[in-house]
Image: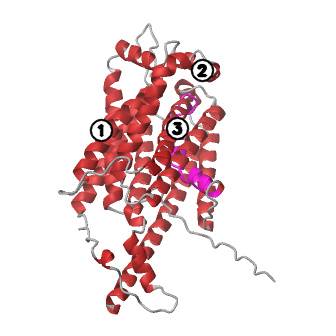
Amino acid sequence: MARAKQPTPVRRELSSEYISKADRKSPSEKEEAAAVSGASGSVKPPSSSSLAVPIKKKAGVATLLIDVAGIYISFLTWAYLQEKLTTTNYGASPISKGERFKFPVFLLTIQSLFAALGGKLFTVLSTPKGQPVPAMIPSRAILPPLLLVAFTNALAAPFGYAALGHIDYITYILAKSCKLLPVMFLHITLFRKRYPLYKYLVVAAVTAGVAVFTLHSGSKKHKASSHSGQTSWGLLLLGINLLFDGLTNSTQDYIFQTFQPYTGPQMMMANNLLSSIITGAYLVLSPWLVKTGLGEWFGMAQATGQEGELAGALAFLARHPEAWRDVLGFALCGCIGQVFIFHTLSTFSSVLLVTVTVTRKMFTMILSVVAFGHRLSEMQWLGVGLVFGGIGVEAGIARREKLAKEEAKRKAKAALGKAQ
């Protein structure tokens, strides 16, 4: 009788939406793990290559504080300028309502160009003296997944900005805090991975929180003045945005795991440069795309005008030059924020970054309430509590998992030292 195939055990995935160098096993670490876990229980000595790996000096508290402050300051300012750009009526006067900035691809292109230059500078400065600067695209094999990341990143932003025309910024921020949902969905459907029970409970709490928040709106007067009120359509657009975000994160994880030692600065440079090329091509072709059936279906002419998004954005900025300050400030803050994120990933653990990210999103929501006069009902605050409570529990479990892995690694190294 043929032997029955054993079921595949549940593989615990990293709880973080980010993966740092510390979360990925290097070849030398794999050798050490194999050396202390042989079937016979014997301990094998490590290879000479593993002994030659230099030990990286740990960063101090000052570096940690600088990274955390950089993430907070840059992304809180970035979020403030994002909401200001999408809600301000530029040129408003007693006789004119003014007009709003409605050119998301143009805005994304400016930010991507800033971030590509920042990524190049970051790569050069982070390369040790005496070593060559790593190539942005080290091999042909890495190009397809990099293009997929750039493509999904370029597609995500327009859907997110379109959603802001139908939902308020608080709902947008709350839903964007739930990146775990699309990441898990894509891993389950595309990569056939399984997750422990607590992850599904976290997803249920987060989903319930978003639903409670959306169904119990605050001030109707304020709501009507800030967006169209087509909440269902806005949530659909935001859902597409989150799916593209999830595919971007999943593909980035695949790149970091498959093409080691590909680094964060290289990813930042490549992703933003390729995104700039894709969105730049769209801007150049937009006058032609407006006149196609696809452009008519998406209502591109109503959004950007018959001349296309590039000409429409430049004309808008010529009429309202004060908007340049917000556009350039938004791009600069996004670039600086990415540098601090990738530096945190390469210097500290991904668990720390998730903690900073969750609290930063909470502060972003508070800033939006204070700066733009949003009013939340009691049920909406309950929804906020469910979302950030679920994310907080997930981050706490991730921290325990990370500490357990570090403890196991210390024991393995201790056993290896005794064997020598």
Q: Is residue 321 left or right of residue 279?
A: left
Residue 164 magenta-highlighted: yes
- Which amino acid type is marked by label 2? Gly
The label on residue 156 is: 3
Residue at 40% over, 47% down: 363
The label on residue 215 is: none
Q: Is residue 417 above or below residue 174?
A: below
Point out the residue furthest to the right here: 1
Mainly helix, strand or loop, the magenta region?
helix
Dot 1: element: helix
Q: Earlier in the sequence, mark 2 or mark 1?
A: 1
Nearer to the camera, 361 or 158: 158
* Residue 170 seen in this snapshot: no
> Can you tell which of label 3 and label 1 is closer to the viewer?
1
Dot 3: element: helix
Nearer to the camera, 258 or 22: 258
* Residue 353 seen in this snapshot: yes
Nearer to the camera, 9 or 387: 9
Q: CA distance from mark 2 to mark 1?
A: 32 Å
- Which amino acid type is marked by label 3? Ala
Residue 35 position within the rendered picture, expressed as x and y whole percent measured from the top left = 42, 84
Residue 207 position within the rendered picture, expressed as x and y whole percent measured from the top left = 62, 51
Where is mark 1, residue-wise?
117
- Which amino acid type is marked by label 1? Leu
Residue at 59% over, 15% down: 291
Mark 1 Cα shell of 10 Å, populated few (<14), some (14-19), many (≥20)? some
Residue 334 magenta-highlighted: no
Q: CA distance from mark 3 to mark 2?
A: 18 Å
Where is mark 2, residue-wise?
295
Q: Which residues are magenta?
A: 163-188
Dot 2: element: helix
